Amino acid sequence: MTHPKKQDLPIFVDKHELAARIGYSQHSFKRFRKNKIWQQGIHYIKINSRTIRYNLDLCLNWLANQHEPKVHDAYIEEHLKIWQPNRSQQQT
């Protein structure tokens, strides 16, 4: 498993680019969000009520590890340690 690095800024893409990159339909993304398969603030962000951007790295990692959720969860934790270092302090 390749770990995220601080110098690698997250790349956020729209639903069209994500669909082209991972081969799922845009309707699948809505289902993933609705069923909490993808988490807001982690796999995607809402810019406003009509605009959503997807974290390309985390969505690709989910695709590669969707049948191994513990592996994907560990990748998310690594991502959060780098990009949200104060998150653990805020949760306590």
Image (cartoon, rainbow, N blue to C red):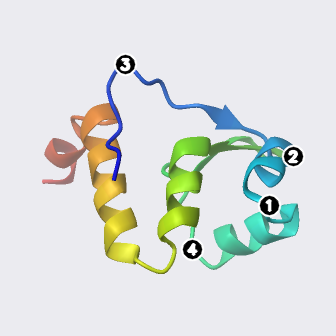
Local secondary structure at mark 3: loop
Where does residue 20 sit, x and y in percent of width and height? 83, 49
Q: Which mark is residue 57?
A: none
Residue displayed at 67% across by 71% down: 32
Of tags 1 and 3, which is closer to the observer?
1
Name the residue tied to disc 4: 36
* Mark toward the viewer: 2 or 1: 1
Q: Earlier in the sequence, mark 4 or mark 1?
A: 1
Of labels 1 and 3, earlier in sequence is: 3
Residue kind at label 4, given as amino acid type: Lys
**Residue position marked by numbered label 1 in the rendering:** 23
Measured Cα–Cα span from mark 1 to mark 3: 27 Å
Indicate the secondary structure of the residue bearing disc 1.
loop
Which mark is in front, 2 or 4?
Answer: 2
Q: On the image, numbered disc 3 is attached to which residue?
A: 7
Query: For the residues marked 2 and 4, what is the alpha-carbon distance in whole angstroms?
Result: 20 Å
Disc 2 designates what residue? 16
